[in-house]
Image: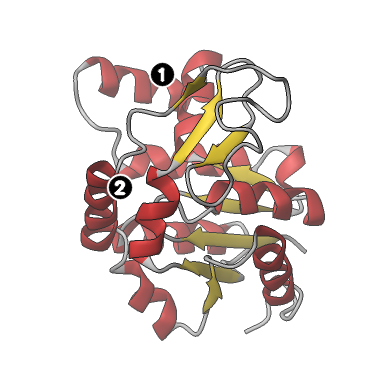
Amino acid sequence: MAINIVLLGPPGAGKGTQAKRLEARYGLVQLSTGDMLRAAVAAGTATGLRAKAVMEAGKLVDDEILIAMISDRLGQADARRGAIFDGFPRTVPQAEALDRLLVSMGRRVDHVIELQVDEAALVERISGRFTCKSCGAGYHDRFQPPRVAGICDACGASEFVRRADDNADTVRRRLAEYHAKTAPILPYYRARGRLRGVDGMADMDRVTAELEAVVGSLPPGAA
């Protein structure tokens, strides 16, 4: 039976990294609506053509199209074991629509896991990140500086880059948007007994272990 996981948490909480680990561990597919939308448009599917027309008109792709796109994706062979929803649902109507879709497919949302973070620490963690321009090795001003200042540990290059949105003001704005738009779905899932919390500030491997403990604690489809 398929396992379907909704992974929640503010920007920078590590959802993408942990989703990839769960994907490998359980044989699931990671579903990002942004990636699916681009793939559907490129492939020229019926849903992709609908989405393309909406975007070319300068409008936002509505929930009906997003759900149709997810339905198409879940019907593919590699999704038969289940999916990890990363970045969707973002609103209560989307959560309700996802529930209806999964029920129509004989599935359900089995686990909703929130990566819980200390926001002040998260701002510091994100705003201090930088990478080697040559090889992409990641560093942090405070938590993971190069062994020799100004020299990449991995390749010896001396030029580093920072993402334009990895600054404190941008991170705080993204956190505020998360609280305003996405956090309201937490009570929706809590009321249905599906919401679990994991310490997203822990070491990456420990977070993975805690996620696996949650996913392994409940058989797919159990109430």
The span from disc 2 to disc 1 (Cα, nearest Å) is 34 Å
Q: Please name which of the two marks, 2 or 1, marks the residue nearer to the observer.
A: 2
Percent position of residue 115, x then y: 50, 66
Front position in the image: 149 or 50: 149
| Above/below status of 170 relative to 221 | above
Q: Residue at horizontal 63%, vertical 63%? A: 107
| Above/below status of 73 relative to 102 | above
Q: Earlier in the sequence, mark 2 or mark 1?
A: 1
Pick the quarter of the image with the C terminus.
bottom right
Disc 1 marks a residue whose amino acid type is Leu
Which disc is residue 171 wearing? 2
Percent position of residue 19, x then y: 63, 51
Question: Is there any visible trace of residue 180 in the rendered image?
Answer: yes
Q: What residue is shown with label 1?
A: 49
Q: Residues within 10 Å of mark 2 (few under 14, many from 20)?
A: many
Pick the quarter of the image with the N terminus.
bottom right
Q: Residue at horizontal 54%, vertical 23%? A: 39
Percent position of residue 178, x then y: 29, 56
Percent position of residue 127, x then y: 37, 44
